[in-house]
Image (cartoon, grey):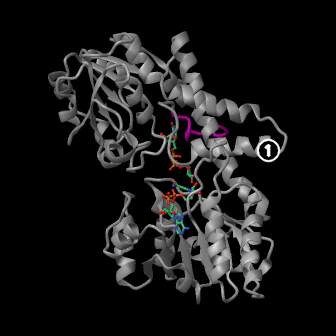
Amino acid sequence: MNLTVIGTGYVGLVSGTCFAEMGNKVTCIDIDKAKIEKLNGGIIPIYEPGLEPMVKRNIENKTLFFSTDLSSNLQGCDVAFIAVGTPMGEDGSADLQYVLQVAKEIGQNMEHSIIVVDKSTVPVGTADKVKETIQKELDKRNKDIEFHVVSNPEFLKEGDAINDFMKPDRVVVGSDNEEASKKMRSLYSPFFRSSTDRLITMDVRSAEMTKYVANAMLATKISFMNEIANICELVGADVNKVRIGIGSDSRIGYSFIYPGSGYGGSCFPKDVKALKKTAEQNGYSPKLIGAVEDVNNKQKLVIAEKIIERFGEDLSGKTFAIWGLSFKPGTDDMREAPAIYIIKELTKRGAKIQAYDPKAIEEAKEFYLKDVEGITYVNSKYEALHGCDAMVLLTEWKEFRAPDFGELKKQLKEPLIFDGRNQYNDEMLLSQGFEYHQIGKKRVG
Ligand SMILES: NC(=O)c1ccc[n+]([C@@H]2O[C@H](COP(=O)([O-])OP(=O)(O)OC[C@H]3O[C@@H](n4cnc5c(N)ncnc54)[C@H](O)[C@@H]3O)[C@@H](O)[C@H]2O)c1
Ligand SMILES: O=c1ccn([C@@H]2O[C@H](COP(=O)(O)OP(=O)(O)O[C@H]3O[C@H](CO)[C@@H](O)[C@H](O)[C@H]3O)[C@@H](O)[C@H]2O)c(=O)[nH]1
């Protein structure tokens, strides 16, 4: 098929590339000229494992193209995906300005029947708005063209996006038109070689809702476990053992019950908020969803609170080595990363920071921590430790999992670790003379 993907961010670029890999001819469109120039030169603007070779291969095979010109690329296209951002609006609801702008441009340029797919995460009712916006533009031009708007939310996660897209647990298609559903099924069928029942079709509103509910459910598991971690610590239990104890029940499962410094990223924080807003706009006051958010906001600062409890409110003269800045391993994405909140909390009390992250330093330096004074960025995890009062682990990158603890002792002023992701064995650290603070268990040492 001929596909146009509008919005070449994490979702647009990964989806477009994976569709091209399956033999479709895909053009990815973006308004960001610099991004498109980079991509045309084979430079990938984001870090996502496995993406670069796949993009390059498909550029060479002439299955993948990048352009800023939506108008000409819409001609001859079978399916147009809207994959632009839907950031948090001022009132907490999803900001639909980019989605509706794209809908307008589609209406202004559509010359033949196409399927328009909402791939961005959008609140219930957005497909209707997209349809109205396109129709209005067609009416202005006196064009009588049949088109269908389909909801096809994306469930990929950063850091494992290619795998998620190429081997999805499920693909949700919300459509009220049989032909459009069939076309979507044939587009996705190469991704399900063995079982076609992983393509789930439903009405448009249920599909839009499914995306928010999936994210809210996962966020709920995390906040629940973070709350349990805080209780464990008070009563002298070990949340790491409790986690294994409950996860072994197949009705509960092991995934998304890791306590830590709270959830971040470009999705959970904004999607939980937007779902809450949708409920409120419809006259329902959601207690649980609001609590998920409140628990997370508090959890982001738990590690900072432990540091303050240990060193006092005034942190001037103290320097902390931060291991990990991105909101999770495997990505350079800093959106809503707990590290932002923790570093701001420490530096506002006078602390200095020596920070290392394998991929996210540029993002932190140029955008998310740009205005924060007192941060030195370094090129290795051991360099970050030099002369510091403690090491603070905030993202569980693989390279932090089994460090040389002798080197930590040598570089730090005292052997002291604050671990926001529970990566280490406390008995081993205790035997090596460390004082070790983690989430959901009393300190050792
Ligand atoms: N990032 C994820 O892991 C993920 C996963 C699933 C769903 N989503 C959802 O997918 C959507 C996109 O997320 P993202 O992380 O890829 O966003 P992003 O910010 O990385 O990318 C969005 C892109 O859209 C471009 N854009 C904006 N307006 C445009 C226009 N009028 N024409 C063409 N391009 C335009 C921007 O320049 C940007 O490059 C959001 O709704 C998000 O919630 C994201
Ligand atoms: O047990 C866990 C699992 C995750 N997290 C945190 O939760 C956040 C989100 O992690 P993850 O879900 O792996 O990353 P995202 O890339 O944000 O992906 C989520 O958001 C995407 C955008 O909507 C969805 O498509 C994905 O299905 C959904 O997992 C991160 O800060 C993690 O550190 C925990 O604290 N504990």
Q: Mark 1 points at which residue?
A: 281
* Quadrant of the rendered image containing residue 281: top right
The N terminus - image quarter: bottom right
Q: In this view, does 332 lie above or below 248?
A: below
Q: Is residue 318 above or below residue 7?
A: above
Q: Nearer the viewer, residue 144 or 385?
A: 144
Instruction: Give the x, y percent position of residue 259.
Output: 51, 30
Q: What residue type is labelled 1?
A: Gln
State the SS at label 1. helix
The residue sitting at the right extreme is: 283
* Quadrant of the rendered image containing residue 349: top left
State the extent of the magenta-drawn residues as a range. 250-258
Instruction: Give the x, y percent position of residue 182.
Output: 72, 79
Does residue 29 appear anywhere in the picture?
yes
Residue positioned 30% across, 42% down in the render: 357
Chief secondary structure of the magenta span? loop
Q: Does the magenta stretch include residue 254?
A: yes
Q: In this view, does 444 lie to the left or right of 114?
A: left
Q: In this view, does 33 lie above or below 87?
A: below
Within 10 angstroms of label 1, few (less than 14), some, or many (20 or more) residues? few
Q: Is residue 81 magenta?
A: no
The C terminus - image quarter: top left
Q: Which of 291 and 200 is in front in this view?
A: 291
Residue positioned 61% across, 70% down in the render: 102
Residue positioned 67% across, 47% down in the render: 93
Instruction: Give the x, y percent position of residue 25.
Output: 50, 83
Residue positioned 69% across, 33% down in the render: 290
